[in-house]
Amino acid sequence: MRQIILLFSLLLVASLVLTACPGPPAPVDAPDTAADSARTDADAEKIIYIGGAVSETGKYAREGQDTRQGYGVWLDWVNNEYGGIKIANHRYKVELVMYDDEGDPDTTARLVERLINEDRVDFLLGPYSSTLTQSASAIAEKYGKIMIEGNGAAETLFERGFQNLFAVLTPAGNYTQSALQMLAAKGAKTVVIAYEDTAFPTSVAEGAQRWAAEYGLELLGVETYPKDVADVSGIISKFKRLEADVFIGGGHFNDAVLFIRAAKELDFNPKAMVITVGPSNPKLVAEVGVDAEYIIGPTQWEASMNYADEYFGSASDYAARYREMWDESPTYQAAESTATALALHLAIEEANSLDTDAVREALRNLDVVTFYGPIDFDETGKNASKPMGAIQIQGGEILVVAPGNAAVADLLYPAPAWKDR
Amino acid sequence: MIAKVRRLPRFFGAWVGLTLWLLLMLLLALYPYTGVSSLTLFVGSQVFVLVTLASNWNLIGGLTGYVDFGHAVFFGIGAYVMGILVTHLPLLISPEWSFWQALPISGVAAAVFALLIGLPTLRLKGPYFSIAMLGTFVVTREIVRVLRPLTGGGSGLSLPPILNRLGDYYLMLGVMGLVVAIIWWIHRSEFGQSLIAIREDEIGAEMRGINTTLHKIVAFMIAAFFTGIVGGFWAWQNTVIDPDVVFIEARTVEMVMMSMLGGLGTVWGPPLGAVIIYFLQDVVWGNLFGVHLLVLGVLLVLLALFLPEGILGALEDRSSTSIGRLLGRVTSRGRN
């Protein structure tokens, strides 16, 4: 007992001593000396520092690589071809400070903190995935640093009232818009939805319900399934009894494969199958072969779309440049990352300054068409102007069917029943 | 020949650990006065979190000998109680205040959950307890997913983005200081000796009149309480939670790894292990990029092979490990 009293009195004294002390000074965030000297030396080459923490390892390693390569294409172009960002008759070279966030929110937070307060970057580029963007953007917001991203689509990101977060990609709620609009025009009447219970697919499904109501499609059923699901036949047999015209489903690539296989096995014959993630990836055709025919999927961007700008040329010019640099075709994650950096670049030139407030204002007013599509941020930082594309797999090829001005093929509807193929 | 027992003067010997610990706390509390960056403060609070978690796990896993493979469930419950209270209840005075109100509730909720889950599972022995806790962990994650109106389901909850690195640093410093001091006290109290007795021979302990159920439950609840507090803190500081970032198996594995590296069942081992693993990960990641996971894995295998009782365990009893025996041989050669 004596010991306990002694222990607690010791703790009490310690805490009293601590509270009696004057509050410690605010953290001193000393600028990085190397970066600082480069910046103050007026005659030296002018440099803009841009930072990002993007997965190189961990669960988002693959998509993180696409993101990094997308940023890399812009970096190579702006420094070596374009000659640097133009501000007040000066050309600023860009230095990109990149770290690996390992797909872990704690590491992301630490690295963003480091980019802002130690590396003293001027602007931030976003990580891959909605979850990590949630963590990272809160820190950017705290320090008033602009973070522009192209790989976090969940609507919740833009419901937090952030002033410094901008995203070039179409938000998740609009993923199925153009596909549903087209299907409604072709005569579809009813729809069923199945989605994975995580942030991004939930946003997609909520949007799909909204757009279905908008275009007069009747919702017959909604089902959710857990992450890493191994069998979806329960959902499919339930939907089979409902006989809906349109099926909307998915969350990840693997789910797309499961839905197609289950639909064929159980002879579930909707007139159109819209699968959120997977169809725009060439691997799907490799995986399920001819069963992928007639499958419709949303896409942020395809190389065959007829968007163009004066910087990277057309979408297919961009794809060629990307292939030359990285020896593989660009995914839409890569293209949107390049577009992210390009949007920041254009805003800096428009603001004619590196001042955060001026660039934020320029981003808000930005209204351009790029190889990736139109970019025009709304007051929450979303790119509401960009329509989501839709593709359909026809003859083993991924062909853009919507929106109209980017389409290269007509939508085939209705899809024949499995036994008639 | 009987080895000579060297002892420090009794009072000093007993209190030297705590005195040094409080001194360290004081130094860490003064550290921000020297003018440090937000990043340093943030790294500090992350390390304090790990030390707290490892020490808590050690209380049930090391001292009591009930290897808990689902301890992160208390972290998750703390995080979700924080998230739910902050987002669903009307905020009192200001968002910061709602944090201070929710933080103790996070801990209490985790402790109550430990009571409910401990009553049946702590009757299980050895691997059965470990598996039952792993099951509890997975089931809780699924329940959180299903309770959509409350927990936001798979989409999770967004908390107000109010970050205060300096405040976080002091808060976690305080929690860590308290937790380690409490474990130090438990270790030398009758309560702690009873826990060790349960670990060594539970039936024997019961025969000697120790209320084993009560002791185990109390230890479990203390460990859960502080893990819940840390979970609540983490939710606030990360500003967003969903089942896949909160309920991750890796968090339990980390606690186990840190405790084992430092020395299971010791007071100072888990804090030491936590600090070493945190900075090891950082150093390896910074310098050996690309093969960092491989290097880390090999290091851990080597540690498990040559230091199975952890660093402090090996120092205390040199004959138990090959490195310890090697050290012993070197030093004894000098003497002969």
Image: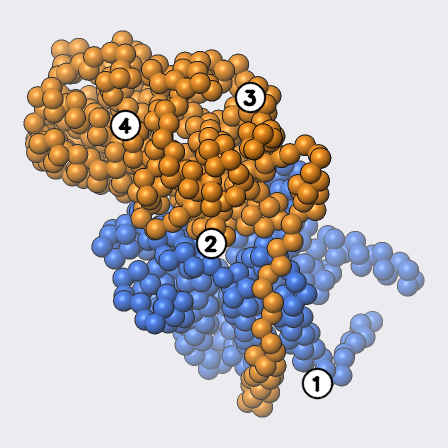
Chain colours: A orange, B blue
Marks 3 and 4 in Cβ contact (< 8 Å): no
Depth check: give the residue in front, A259 or A90: A90
Element carrying mark 4: loop
Q: Nearer the viewer, mark 3 or mark 2?
A: 3
Per the image, label 2 sits on a secondary structure element best described as helix
Q: Amino acid at mark 1?
A: Phe
Tell me which chain the residue with mark 3 is part of: A
Residue B176 shows in the view: no
Residues at marks 4 and 2, common chain?
Answer: yes
Query: Residue drawn 68% across and 32% down?
Result: A45
Do the dots labelled 3 and 2 sit on one chain? Answer: yes
Alpha carbons under labels 4 and 2: distance apart: 31 Å
Q: In the image, what residue occupies the spot 17% across and 34% down?
A: A211
> Which residue does the numbered mark 4 point to in the structure image?
A387
Amino acid type, residue under disc 3 in the picture = Tyr
- Where residue A89 appears, x then y in whole percent? 58, 29
Residue A364: give x, y in percent of width and height. 38, 39
Mark 2, Cα crowd under 10 Å, few <14 / some 14-19 / many 20+, is some
Residue bearing mark 3: A82
Query: How far apart, in angstroms, are the residues tagged by discs 2 and 1?
Result: 49 Å
Q: Among all residues in the image, which is located at the extreme top?
A: A395
Spatial CA distance of label 3 from label 2 is: 33 Å
Q: Nearer the viewer, mark 3 or mark 4?
A: 3
Q: Is residue B298 left or right of residue B156?
A: right
The residue wearing badge 1 is B11
The disc labelled 4 sits on which kind of residue?
Pro
The N terminus of chain A - image quarter: bottom right
Asked if residue B5 is positioned above or below residue B173 in the image, the reply reads: below
Alpha carbon distance from label 3 to label 4: 29 Å
For label 2, the residue is A142
